[in-house]
Amino acid sequence: MTTLTFSQAFNELAGRLQKVIVGKSAQIEKTLVCLLAGGHLLLEDMPGVGKTTLASALSASIGGVFSRIQFTADLLPSDIIGSRIYRRQTEQFEFVKGPVFANVLLADELNRAPPKTQSALLQAMNDFMVSVEKHQFELARPFMVIATQNPKGFHGTYPLPESQRDRFMMRVTLGYPSELEEFEILKIHHGKLQEKICESFLTIEQVTTAQAEARCVAMAEPVMKYISRMICAIRSHDEVELPVSPRGSIALMNAAQALAYIRGKTYVSIDMVKEIAPEVLAHRIGLRGVSSLSAEGARNEWLVGEILQRVPVE
């Protein structure tokens, strides 16, 4: 596919998803950007606003293998990765793969599991492989984790460790619908039973090809220098205790390339970097005097917005 035709295909896919998640076109576009950039997505919001529905619809629309894990307090790392079991017939141990071996993994309510269980995803999200005892197992490509997270303060939730948050390329919040959007949702669901929310639209091969092409979108050195100045400004800010890592700056570059690719552009502009920066950077920042439970909130987004206004465009 050319950049233009794939851009059109993604726009059509976005339109299909908008029939499932009403009134969230911006969030849907950023979700597709994360997929195209080869990253992992963290959906955080109140229960019932469509986080799981969006994740399920996206995974169904690209085909491939889909797995869903409902995270609970008693979930074990082996429930995610898999485990070795002894077969009496062969008198040997055999590794039984867990649900992480998929193209799209929906980690529902990720922060209801303790940090020990959450950490089972770290290697998979970063290296696209898992280690069991002395053996390593490659994951399928593309591999994307879409995790939903309940907001801070909900009963039975654990804060995501900093290393876990940093492996999510983007964090997107859906928010409640407006009055008109609420009315449209009621009309869609009136008189209907539960239906299949989406059908396969793109193939895994098309997604993989598009991901490779998106990485080749041109980014001029002045744009890269702008990203460097922004990251350094965050690190030197007085309120920042945990700054953005180099993984975050690379994620911002790749996300901006994917945004340009989806929109049919052949290069990345600074405006595109500014547009996608809050979703890529805000959840990676830890503020002084703020607990880890609330470190992913509006103050982080405000800080990124302040930096965007202060950093000069040269």
Image: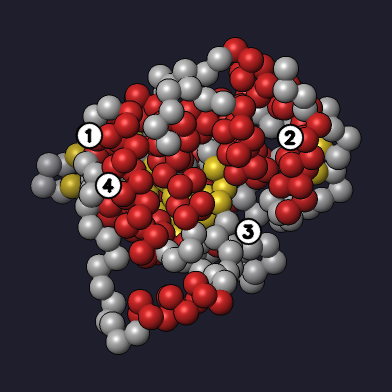
Position of the N terminus, as image quadrant, is top left
Say which amino acid is labelled 2. Leu
Looking at the picture, does residue 285 appear above or below residue 214?
below
As helix, strand or loop, the secondary structure at mark 1 comes to helix
Tell me the CA gap for discs 1 and 4.
9 Å
The part of the image, by quadrant, that contains residue 93 is top left
Looking at the picture, does residue 273 appear above or below residue 278?
above
Whole-percent x, y for residue 176 in the image: 57, 69
The part of the image, by quadrant, that contains residue 185 is bottom left
Q: Earlier in the sequence, mark 1 or mark 4?
A: 4
User: Which-is-in-front pick, marks 4 and 2?
Assistant: 2
How many numbered circles does the render carry? Answer: 4
Judging by the rendered image, the residue that carries numbered circle 3 is: 158
Q: Earlier in the sequence, mark 2 or mark 3?
A: 3
User: Which-is-in-front pick, marks 2 and 1?
Assistant: 2
Q: Which mark is residue 308?
A: 2
Q: Earlier in the sequence, mark 2 or mark 1?
A: 1
Say which amino acid is labelled 4. Ile
Tell me the CA gap for discs 2 and 3.
31 Å
Residue found at x 60% / y 12%: 221
Judging by the rendered image, the residue that carries numbered circle 1 is: 205
Say which amino acid is labelled 1. Glu
Judging by the rendered image, the residue that carries numbered circle 4 is: 62
Residue found at x 34% / y 43%: 10
The part of the image, by quadrant, that contains residue 21 is bottom left
